[in-house]
């Protein structure tokens, strides 16, 4: 049967065999539960062997009619494909209908990027005299200085900050560790937070090694980071829809604009494939055009 028991085994597979992060596991399990709810809603058989290609295609059409974006549809389809990979591996089904389904066309998405001046204006909008001002400044500086994901910033550990060597150790997707250089100025900002705020508050014993702590003495949530960034962006007059990932995009783009090697940026971002990192080279195309227009003699010549 297509039931909660089967989903539990799927979650165990994602956690133990795929070594996925908890956020990815939650997303995949939600995808499958959404598909189950659809099948129940149309009174379809809930037996896993009774689900065929046209059922999955009908589900995707249903998501489209709901107005769901192609990107969101593609992500849910990815979850269903992962589920069928598990079913095949466990010999629960013999055929995988998802191999005949292509992901919805979503085009190439170019992430929003902040200019360096916009980032500085957001940092300057933080009132250090307010509670958690030093913490929030340190969070934004680390997001931009190291290109971290939001899940990586909230789980960053004090024991993984190497002040002397100016590196931090990050646990990324799939429990993969990587070392990222960190600027001395950013390390000083972290130290100011620890000395001025963190030492003076209660910290839950389970979170003594976590760098960024909330008022209850536990780790920050992803939502808190989003809300905090939105508040400071509005205060700084930055009229863009941004979140924690925007600083990661800006980190990568600014490095490439400055001439950094693509593979070095790939390693610092924790991308398993360089093709994922290559999207940032397209963001820099306009920058390259501006440079050649300004400095190349042929582009500077007037038309006659």
Image: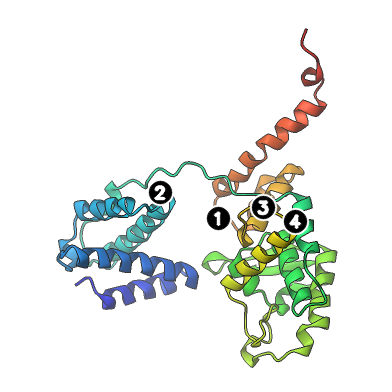
Residue drawn at 43 percent across, 73 percent down:
15
Whether residue 164 is visible, yes or no, is: no
Q: Residue 175: x, y in percent?
A: 55, 69
Mark 2 or mark 3, which is nearer the start of the sequence? 2
Q: Give the image quarter of residue 163.
A: bottom right
Tag of residue 119 = 4
Q: Which residue is mark 2?
A: 70
Between 127 and 158, the one nearer to me in the picture: 127
Please tell me how crowded label 1 is: few (under 14), some (14-19), or many (20+) other residues with Cα within 10 Å.
few
The quadrant of the rendering that contains the C terminus is top right
Between 36 and 94, the one nearer to me in the picture: 36
Mark 4 or mark 3, which is nearer the start of the sequence? 4
Q: CA distance from mark 3 to mark 1?
A: 33 Å
Assess whether mark 2 and mark 4 are in contact (beta carbons under 8 angstroms): no
Q: Is residue 134 above or below residue 116?
A: below
Pick out the residue farthest to the top: 304
Q: Is residue 203 above or below residue 266?
A: below
Q: Which residue is mark 3?
A: 239
Q: Which residue is mark 1?
A: 272
Q: Is residue 168 above or below residue 132?
A: above
Q: Is residue 51 above or below residue 222?
A: above
Q: CA distance from mark 3 to mark 2?
A: 26 Å
Q: Residue 221: x, y in percent?
A: 58, 75
Between 90 and 234, the one nearer to me in the picture: 234
Front position among marks 3 and 1 = 3
Q: Give the image quarter of residue 294.
A: top right
Q: Residue 162: x, y in percent?
A: 78, 72
Element carrying mark 4: helix
The quadrant of the rendering that contains the N terminus is bottom left
Front position among marks 2 and 1 = 2
């Amino acid at each position: 049967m297509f039931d909660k028991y089967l989903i539990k085994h799927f979650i165990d597979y994602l956690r133990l065999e795929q070594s996925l992060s908890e956020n990815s596991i939650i997303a995949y399990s939600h995808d499958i539960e959404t598909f189950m709810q659809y099948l129940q809603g149309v009174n379809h058989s809930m037996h896993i062997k009774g689900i065929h290609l046209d059922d999955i295609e009908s589900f995707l059409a249903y998501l489209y009619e709901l107005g769901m974006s192609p990107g969101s549809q593609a992500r849910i389809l990815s979850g269903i494909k992962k589920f069928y990979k598990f079913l095949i591996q466990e010999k629960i089904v013999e055929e995988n209908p998802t191999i005949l389904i292509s992901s919805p066309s979503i085009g190439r998405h170019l992430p929003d990027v902040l200019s360096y001046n916009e980032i500085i204006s957001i940092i300057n909008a933080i009132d250090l005299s307010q509670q958690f001002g030093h913490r929030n400044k340190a969070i934004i500086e680390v997001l931009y200085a190291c290109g971290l994901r939001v899940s990586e910033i909230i789980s960053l550990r004090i024991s993984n900050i190497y002040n002397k060597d100016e590196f931090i150790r990050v646990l990324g997707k799939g429990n993969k560790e990587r070392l990222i250089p960190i600027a001395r100025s950013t390390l000083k900002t972290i130290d100011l937070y620890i000395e001025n705020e963190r030492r003076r508050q209660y910290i839950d014993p389970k979170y003594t090694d976590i760098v960024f702590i909330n008022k209850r003495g536990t780790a920050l949530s992803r939502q808190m980071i989003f809300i905090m960034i939105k508040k400071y962006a509005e205060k700084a007059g930055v009229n863009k829809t941004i979140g924690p990932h925007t600083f990661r995009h800006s980190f990568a783009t600014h490095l490439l604009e400055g001439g950094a090697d693509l593979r070095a940026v790939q390693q610092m971002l924790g991308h398993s494939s360089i093709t994922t990192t290559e999207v940032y080279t397209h963001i820099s195309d306009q920058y390259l055009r501006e440079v050649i227009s300004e400095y190349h003699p042929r582009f500077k010549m007037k038309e006659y």
